[in-house]
Each structure stands twice: as structure tokens, then as C-alpha cells.
Image: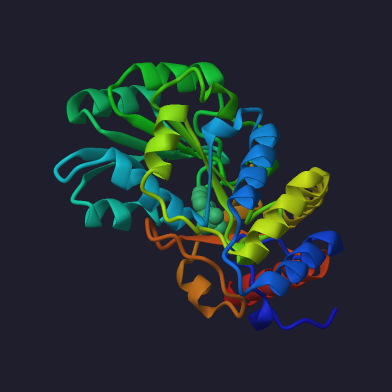
Amino acid sequence: MNCDPSELRLYFNEFPRPPPANVIKAAREALRDANRYPEDKLVEELKSLMSSYAGLKPENVHATSGGEYAFYELFTRLVRPGDSAILLEPTFTSYEPILKVLGVKVHKLRLEENGYRWILDKDKLFSLMRTEKPRLLVIDDPNNPTASPMLADEDLVREVCSSFGGYLLLDEAYTEYAGYSASKLVPEIGNLVVFRTMSKAFALAGMRVSILLATKQLIESIEGFSPRFELSRPSLAAAVEALSDPSYAFRNADFIKSERERVRRALKSMNGLKAYESFTNYILMRFNYPQLIDSLKIRLMRPAFDNQYARLSIGSKLENNCAVSALRDSLNSGE
Ligand SMILES: Cc1ncc(COP(=O)(O)O)c(C=O)c1O
């Protein structure tokens, strides 16, 4: 097979194909009104569709642009300078800089390797929560970059939330791949916030549409301060069209899951690397010789926590084949 691994874009955890034609058409048609600010009723429509998708009421939903902005909006409502927050290590890299800018003291709970998964030690979490009394605990579930499930259990989410006076942000960016979500608990648990995005299985990363799910009171507090026109007309139109029939996101997720398992089998047959189990659209790998990662033709995401690791996103069949053969060639020639 002819392929150029240096052309592969398997480091942002994007979906490899564009969204369906009806979604693209809706976004394109919205450009005809590009001279007009978006109407509130478009936002209301999006919130209503998002709430049915998440099994909640529109009052529990804040529709916003990408994750970084959503986290900024949320954190500014929840924390004050000098507060403490607990993050996992490793975790998605966007939370910490925002918390630092807001003057929050960040404490880290290191995940532990357990076979082909990474786990969060609950006793250590509860003990850190007792000593640090955080205003905020952020858990990406599944975790980025390990792709492992973290709490993944409603009773555990309840237990964590009831054990402290702060807020738990569960980042469920990969929920369509993982097949679990705690979002239904949002109305009953006052200190739980769930983040979702349309960037992954909905194939809309370029449109920047994401969702915060929380109690009515917290949503009102966020919306009281959020910009009036947060999402552009094309983004709103694409998201509304996508959520009018979200079934394509699950077909996308099924495709990625089957490719992910195929890629993982191929990776596991290679000497010199370990490929972890994944509940997402990427696979974390550990290389016996970290210097090999720098010499690869394919660009991978290098998590900051340890130089032995690299993350590979799952792409189209052709892209995955190209990535696998590039890795195999490098490992063979590196030995
Ligand atoms: C855990 C996690 N949260 C949030 C995001 C970002 O989502 P968005 O595209 O909505 O900014 C990502 C993207 O890779 C992610 O891995």
C-alpha cells in the first residue's frame, strides 16, 4: 500500500470523515444569513435537542463553543483565587492553564497502571479530597490520554459528589465511544457538572460546539454571564441538524470502535511497544525505546507525563493501515 505517514493527522482525536451531507447543507445555508446575528430561538432549539439527547431538560443545558471556552465559563463561576482543585495525572491538558490563570492551587492525583488499563485509586482520591478540600475535582472519563474508564459508575459518581463540598466536573468528551455517561444524575446531584462535545463522534470539531450539563441554578448562573452570541449561525445550524438525527454519531462510533480493535490487535503483535485498552477513539502506547518515537515518520501526540508514551488517534481504514505499517517498519528497523 502506498502511503505517506508524514501526511497523517492522527494526533487530534478527530473523526476522519466529514459530517453527513444534510449537516453540511444546513451549515452552508446558514451562511446566507451571515449578516444577521443568530436568533435566540436557534439557541433554544439546540438546547432542546441537546437535552433530549442527554436525557435531561433544556434548563440543564448550556450550549457553548469548544471545551476550552466551556471550561473557562464554568471555572470562573465556581472558583476563586486561592481555592484548590484536584486534577488527574495524566489528564486533558486544557484544564490546568485556565485554573492557574484563575489563581487556583492545583493538586494532582497520579493514575496507576494496571495491566492494559490505567486506574484511579479511590482511596487515594478520597484521602486527597479530605486533606485538600478542593472546590473543584476534574475527571475526564474516559481519561485522555490513557483512554481508560475512570469512575464509569453512577454509584461511584454519587459517592464522590456526596463526599465533598466542591464540584465534580466529569468530562465525557468520548461518551459515544465509551458507551456510558453520568449525565442523567445531573438534576439530582447539585455539585455535578458534565461536559460533552460534538467534536468527536458527531464529526463537528471544526464547528466548535460543546455542552455543559448541570443543575438549573448553575446553568442560570453560567448563562447570566455568558456572551449573548456564543455560537455562530453555521455552528448552530450544523449542530441542530446533527442532533435532529443523532444516529450517525453512533454509526461513526461503531466504525471507530471496530477499527480501534483491529489497530490494537496489530499493535499488540509488534515487539517493543505496549498498546493499552481503549474506551475512546485513540490508543495510548508505551515504547520500550522512547527515542524511537522521535524518529517516527508519523506524528503522534506525546503526553507530557512521561516520554515513553505516545497516543495514536483512530482514522479511516487507509490511514490506520498506513499508521500501522509505519510503526511496524520503524520498530523493525529500530531493533
Ligand atoms: C477529554 C477531552 N475534553 C475535551 C476535549 C475538547 O473538546 P472540544 O473539541 O469541544 O474543545 C478533548 C479533545 O480532544 C478531550 O480529549
Q: What x and y, as percent, mark residue 39?
A: 61, 56
Q: Residue furthest left?
A: 82
Tell me where residue 61 appears, x and y as whole percent.
54, 37
* Position of residue 137 measured from the top left corner of the image (x, y, whole percent): 34, 35
**Residue drawn at point x = 37 percent, y = 56 percent:** 305
| Lateral position of residue 315 relative to residue 215, left or right | right
Q: Quadrant of the C terminus?
A: bottom right
- Residue 279 image offset from top left, x and y in percent: 64, 42
Q: Is residue 29 visible?
A: yes
Which of 254/221 is in front?
Answer: 221
Q: Residue at x 31, y 42 (%)?
A: 77
Residue drawn at point x = 66 percent, y = 38 percent = 48
Question: Going by the image, does 46 lie left or right of 215?
Answer: right
User: At 66% across and 52% down in the image, what residue appears?
Assistant: 281
User: Height in image: 125 above or below 158?
Assistant: below
Q: How many marks?
A: 0
In this view of the protein, can residue 145 be seen by the observer?
no
